[in-house]
Amino acid sequence: MSGMGATKCPECSSKRLIRDYEKGELLCAQCGLIIVENIHDSGPEWRAFDAEQKEKRAHSGAPIRYMRPNKGLVTEIDQYNRDIRGGKISPKKQAQLYRMRKWHKRVSIATSMERNLVIALAELDRVASSLGLPENIKESAALLYRRAVKAELIRGRLIESVVAAVIYAICRIQGIPRTLDEIAKASGIEKKEIGRAYRFIKTELEVSVPLTDPSQYVPKFASALRLGGQVQEEAVKLIKKSLKKGLISGRGPTGVAAAALYIASALFGEKRTQKEVADVAGVTEVTIRNRYRELKKELGLKINL
């Protein structure tokens, strides 16, 4: 018999089976045979009937959450005003709990650093959610913000600009195509201010940010411009050729992606104007023209737009 439903060892018929969740194995305590691999811990194998039992039987604490000002590691007093069995608490007890919650909250954000985190992490959650970023990106950005606070890089800077900067940095590190314009719009902070904060944090914390491949932006821009698959493929090909020849080093990835799409759309009879492409990419028409001329000349493209 094998599988997680096994009740005895198929080799020696022993019923002494051990579930090793650290190694992800179900094995026989008698002969050592590994019966099942890659098992998952489905949670505690116990029930608690009161707070004392729950405390005694719990395996570990809550996971660390960098998006929480206290990392989620302190006790919280819930808002339900009910006891462990679900019964209502007397008005006197409710008033006592209200005072406890109030003072608990005050004590939890006592220092200036903690107050800073309360404001910053709420703003981080708002901006990241507006950009449609997942929880793991929020957590990574929160961790980077904490590093900046610890290194005292926030002094003299607007909290919101640093929050936007760490979100931009994490998006670039993770290869998520979010432009400075998008982050500026979501945060309400000027693009130049975010850029300054980003460069400062990157340098001071020695954050390794890979060069952004302009191809990452092609599907997003093409979708907004309603361009077909062939146009996207051609734009990516143009970008790859440019990268191989080292033509776009130091150039903004959004401008390069926009110019490649501008050229590809004309090649396949789906031409879009420079203004249409520039508006979608968040760059100027001058940038589109400059990148277009460079790509046309260096790649030997026979096209007149």
Image (cartoon, rainbow, N blue to C red):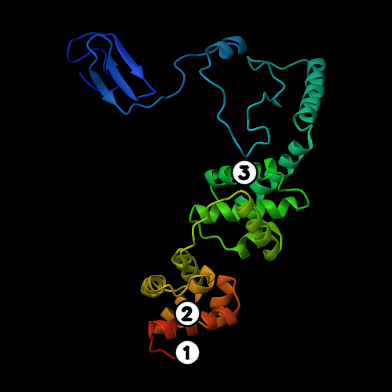
The x and y percentages for residue 181 are: 62, 65
Residue type at mark 1 is Leu
Q: Exactly how many numbered labels are in the figure?
A: 3
The x and y percentages for residue 55 are: 58, 13
Of badges 1 and 3, nearer the viewer stands 3
Residue designated by label 2: 262
Relative to 268, is 8 on the left or the right? left
* The furthest residue to the bottom: 304
Neighbour class for label 3 at 10 Å: few (<14), some, many (≥20)? Answer: many
Can residue 47 be seen in this snapshot? yes
Above or below, 114 against 126 in this view is above
Compute the Cα span from label 3 to label 2: 37 Å
Residue designated by label 3: 142
Q: Nearer the viewer, residue 192 or 209?
A: 209
Marks 2 & 1, CB-CB < 8 Å contact: yes
The x and y percentages for residue 219 are: 45, 66
Residue designated by label 1: 305
Relative to 8, is 107 on the left or the right? right
Judged from the image, the secondary structure of the residue bearing numbered disc 1 is loop
Residue located 51% across and 60% down the image: 177
Residue type at mark 3 is Ala
Location of the N terminus by quadrant is top left
Q: Nearer the viewer, residue 272 or 177?
A: 177
Residue located 51% across and 68% down the image: 253
